[in-house]
Image: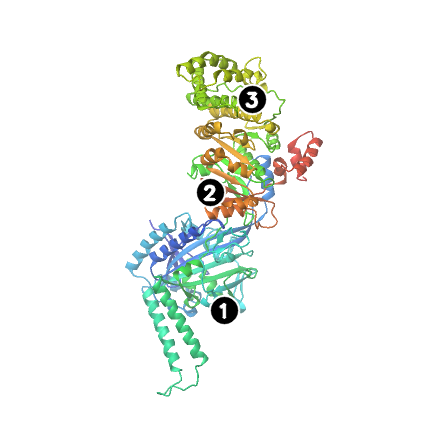
């Protein structure tokens, strides 16, 4: 079924739209368009720029001849607005208010494909935009010029359209074909965007008097890059980002990025690529070269014929010789490198301002007041034919593509994500760190690790990410070795418990939640590893593989034969009764130090020094199943490595009771080891760690290991072989002080040169006026995105870990009876 729309607006150079194809008033030229979205700035290595080049070459090859590819990018200032969500939390409301009204930058990118007449190369400004002086009836009497396109060419047009659409639907362009709604939609339609160069809607007055162009009360000044002599000798595929990178850490951007998102003024960037008939254009070049050569010969001094005689060559003669030589070299370059010739035109329209580029920008743009009417109307979607052919410059295909703009701002991935900040603009974005990447297949688990030096904002970032997961209804379990999560826990009415050396806390790990096969299997691994750790002695080989196997067999039998009263006392009694028989039956009496092991375990049996630890479950812990925000602060135990490891082990088991509970299977359960991973950094625990990290996935859980001791973290074999290899998410805060370890960290994380350079450039050259900390998210060791973390002052009071600020907050707490909600308001000055 045909969809036909006749456009009544006489100021538009478009006659109508039929089945997503626009029909121009100039020659009835046919066009179609796409909204595109490029990868974010600083995210592309050199190889991806070459991939983009290949895609553009494919498009040019499909179109073959007599087409214009019009790339268009709008950069407009906007005001950030948000609608309150249902059941908005206090912190969500504070952040919404914090960001509301912020001036943000928006980029809107499009690609239009226009079929032009075969003689378009001869169109000068007298042949373009003639619709401005035609009578209305001429549009109705003849829509498409018969000389413009035949039936066969029309069929070819639609076949090529399908192929171009397919070529642009990829991760580098993310093309979405524009339908009639995309062109005509009120305010947000691209034709309305063209009319006013903004999304205000309506129809602002246009003035072209005295070679000055105004839309409403704002002047639009065009600058053009239209002559080859405005270019440098070589147009690079990409250029280095001098301000963002440091020393040898290279980051790249498109050659004309300064004309795009790095320009402060509102503006429109137009890039036109006209694909002529190569045969015809080469014939013209050859003719021009011959004319120049003959003209030069005419002026050579000679006594023959009727030519004027000169004693030396004239300036005109010399210039013609140079131009003829340049034409020959240009033609030879195209032929020898099997390239096509593409006529190219670049212009930028500055709205209410002047062109400002850095001293390092390689290309010269000139103000263009003579062609402002043509430049404006040619920027209309589907009216690329409105650009006079004499404004183009001939370039090789490679050089033309290099003058394209292929950058964008970082964008969010889900409306329910955590609010972060795009670091090139300060724009708020919503990004779902865990669930959306998992659902899209970017990762296969939600396990994560995170590093950042002291003061890098590591803990602040994790507070932000985990608190957001809490607002989504998920469960947070922190084993906190840094004292960074107390305020967030208390603010969310969670369970907070500080464990010290004198604390007597019953953490019986033998209890079962459901008794399922999966839980008992996990319990067998846990208890065997836990007991192996208890009997570990650096001077003796008590904790060997045979001992582990013995514990496994005992645990298996224990849960098969003992049906109630699960605790260490009943386990110890079962062990004393059955272990000797197993050891003797298998002839391993000399390899398993059974008497020593039994003796060491006795201190945890009734009457022993630690009998409280493994036989009872403290009353304080009874409500943990339904408490969604839990933090055990164990920082004080770090001076006692054995107790530190035992406690971390037992708390891990406590978390696992949440993991297997049937009422929580639909919730993600996060187990966060913050600065407590060292408790597990022992060779005998490697299998336990690997098993734990892999097991949580099947029960919709996730482990997170974070550290500010970056070198120790990456030097640990357990971290490298278990945590990093089995965790699909990495979160990196400021690591610039570790630049000397670049190659080492790059190899461990399996990152590319470009990705590791981007991580070491975190927090370089951030936009002014925003209080943010930049961090990187690595997914499956392949994909890297970076964002800034900025929050309201109210939320900052909840996540603050700076010692001086914590003192200030503590005084406010004491003044309002430790009500952290009131503290947040007072800290923000409200």
Residue at x 39%, y 48% (from the top left corner): 170
**Contact? badges 2 and 1 (CB < 8 Å):** no
First of labels 2, 3 by sequence position: 3
SS under mark 3 = loop
Q: N-terminal of the two: label 3 or label 1?
A: 1
Would you identify the image quadrant in which residue 467 lies?
Answer: top right
Looking at the rendered image, the disc whose residue lies closer to the viewer, 3 or 1, is 3
The colour scheme used to paint the residues is rainbow
| Callout 1 crowding tier (Cα within 10 Å): few <14, some 14–19, many ≥20 | few
Total marks shown come to 3
* Residue 133, position as x, y percentages in the image: 44, 67
In the image, farthest residue toward the left: 152
Residue appearing at x 38%, y 86% in the figure:
302
Q: CA distance from mark 3 to mark 1?
A: 77 Å
Looking at the rendered structure, the secondary structure element under dot 2 is: helix
Residue 611 vs 749, above or below: the answer is: above
Disc marking residue 747? 2
What is the crowding at mark 3: few (fewer than 14 residues within 10 Å), some, or many (at least 20)? few
Q: Percent from the top left, x then y, of residue 623?
A: 56, 22
What secondary structure is found at the residue carrying circle 1?
A: loop
Residue at numbered disc 3? 623
């Amino acid at each position: 079924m045909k969809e036909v729309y006749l456009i009544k607006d006489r100021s538009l150079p478009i006659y109508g739209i039929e089945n997503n194809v626009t029909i121009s008033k100039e020659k009835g030229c046919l066009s179609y368009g796409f909204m595109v979205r490029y990868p974010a700035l600083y995210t592309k290595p050199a190889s991806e720029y070459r991939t983009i080049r290949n895609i553009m070459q494919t498009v040019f090859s499909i179109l073959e001849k007599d087409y214009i590819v019009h790339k268009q990018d709008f950069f407009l200032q906007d005001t950030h607005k948000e609608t309150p969500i249902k059941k908005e939390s206090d912190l969500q409301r504070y952040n919404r208010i914090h960001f509301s009204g912020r001036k943000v930058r928006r980029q809107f990118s499009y690609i239009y494909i226009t079929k032009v007449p075969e003689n378009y190369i001869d169109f000068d400004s007298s042949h373009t935009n003639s619709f401005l002086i035609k009578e209305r009836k001429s549009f109705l009497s003849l829509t498409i010029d018969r000389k413009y396109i035949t039936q066969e060419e029309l069929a070819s047009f639609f076949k090529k359209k399908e192929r171009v659409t397919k070529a642009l639907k990829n991760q580098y362009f993310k093309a979405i074909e524009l339908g009639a709604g995309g062109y005509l939609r009120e305010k947000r339609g691209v034709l309305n965007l063209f009319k006013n160069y903004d999304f205000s809607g309506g129809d602002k007055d246009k003035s072209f008097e005295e070679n000055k162009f105004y839309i409403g009360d704002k002047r639009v000044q065009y600058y053009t890059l239209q002559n080859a002599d405005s270019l440098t000798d070589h147009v690079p595929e990409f250029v280095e980002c001098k301000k963002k990178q440091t020393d040898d850490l290279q980051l790249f951007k498109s050659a004309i990025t300064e004309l795009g998102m790095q320009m402060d003024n509102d503006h429109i960037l137009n890039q036109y690529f006209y694909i002529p008939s190569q045969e015809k254009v080469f014939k013209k070049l050859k003719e021009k070269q011959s004319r120049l050569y003959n003209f030069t010969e005419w002026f050579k001094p000679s006594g023959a014929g009727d030519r004027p005689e000169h004693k030396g060559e004239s300036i005109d003669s010399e210039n013609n010789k140079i131009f003829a030589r340049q034409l020959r070299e240009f033609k030879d370059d195209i032929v020898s490198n099997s390239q096509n010739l593409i006529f190219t035109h670049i212009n930028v329209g500055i709205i209410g301002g002047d062109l400002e580029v850095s001293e390092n920008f390689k290309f010269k743009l000139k103000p263009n007041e003579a062609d402002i009417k043509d430049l404006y109307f040619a920027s209309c979607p589907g009216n690329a034919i409105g650009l006079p052919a004499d404004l183009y410059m001939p370039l090789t295909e490679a050089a033309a593509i290099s003058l394209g703009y292929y950058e964008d701002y970082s964008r969010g991935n889900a409306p329910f994500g955590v609010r972060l900040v795009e670091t090139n603009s300060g724009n708020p974005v919503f990004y779902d760190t865990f669930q959306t990447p998992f659902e899209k297949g970017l990762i296969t688990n939600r396990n994560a690790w995170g590093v950042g030096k002291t003061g890098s904002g590591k803990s602040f970032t994790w507070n932000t990410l985990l608190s957001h997961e809490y607002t989504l209804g998920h469960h947070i379990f922190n084993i906190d070795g840094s004292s960074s999560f107390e305020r967030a826990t208390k603010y969310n009415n969670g369970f907070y418990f500080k464990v010290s050396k004198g604390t007597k806390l019953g953490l019986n790990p033998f209890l079962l939640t459901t008794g399922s096969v999966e839980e008992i299997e996990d319990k067998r691994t846990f208890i065997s590893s836990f007991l192996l750790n208890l009997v570990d002695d650096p001077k003796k080989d008590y904790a060997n593989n045979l001992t582990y196997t013995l514990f496994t067999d005992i645990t298996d039998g224990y849960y098969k034969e003992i049906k109630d009263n699960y605790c260490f006392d009943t386990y110890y009694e079962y062990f004393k009764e059955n272990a000797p028989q197993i050891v003797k039956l298998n002839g391993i009496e000399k390899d398993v130090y059974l008497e020593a092991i039994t003796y060491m375990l006795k201190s945890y049996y009734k009457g022993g020094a630690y009998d409280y630890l493994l036989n009872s479950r403290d009353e304080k812990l009874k409500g943990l199943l339904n408490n969604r925000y839990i933090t055990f602060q164990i920082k004080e135990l770090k001076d006692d490595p054995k107790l530190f490891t035992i406690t971390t082990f037992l708390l891990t088991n406590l978390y696992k009771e949440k993991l297997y509970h049937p009422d929580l299977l639909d919730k993600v359960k996060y187990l966060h080891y913050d600065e407590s991973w060292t408790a597990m950094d022992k060779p005998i625990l490697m299998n336990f760690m690997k098993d734990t990290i892999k097991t949580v996935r099947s029960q919709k859980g996730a482990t997170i290991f974070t550290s500010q001791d970056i070198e120790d973290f990456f030097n640990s074999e357990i971290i490298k072989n278990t945590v990093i290899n089995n965790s699909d998410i990495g979160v990196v805060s400021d690591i610039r002080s570790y630049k000397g370890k670049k190659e080492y960290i790059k190899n461990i994380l399996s990152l590319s040169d470009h990705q590791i350079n981007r991580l070491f450039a975190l927090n370089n050259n951030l936009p002014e006026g925003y209080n943010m900390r930049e961090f990187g998210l690595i997914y499956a060791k392949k994909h890297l995105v970076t964002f800034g973390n900025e929050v309201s002052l109210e939320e900052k009071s909840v996540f603050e870990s700076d010692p001086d600020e914590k003192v200030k907050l503590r005084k406010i707490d004491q003044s309002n009876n430790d009500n952290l909600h009131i503290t947040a308001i007072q800290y923000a000055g409200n």
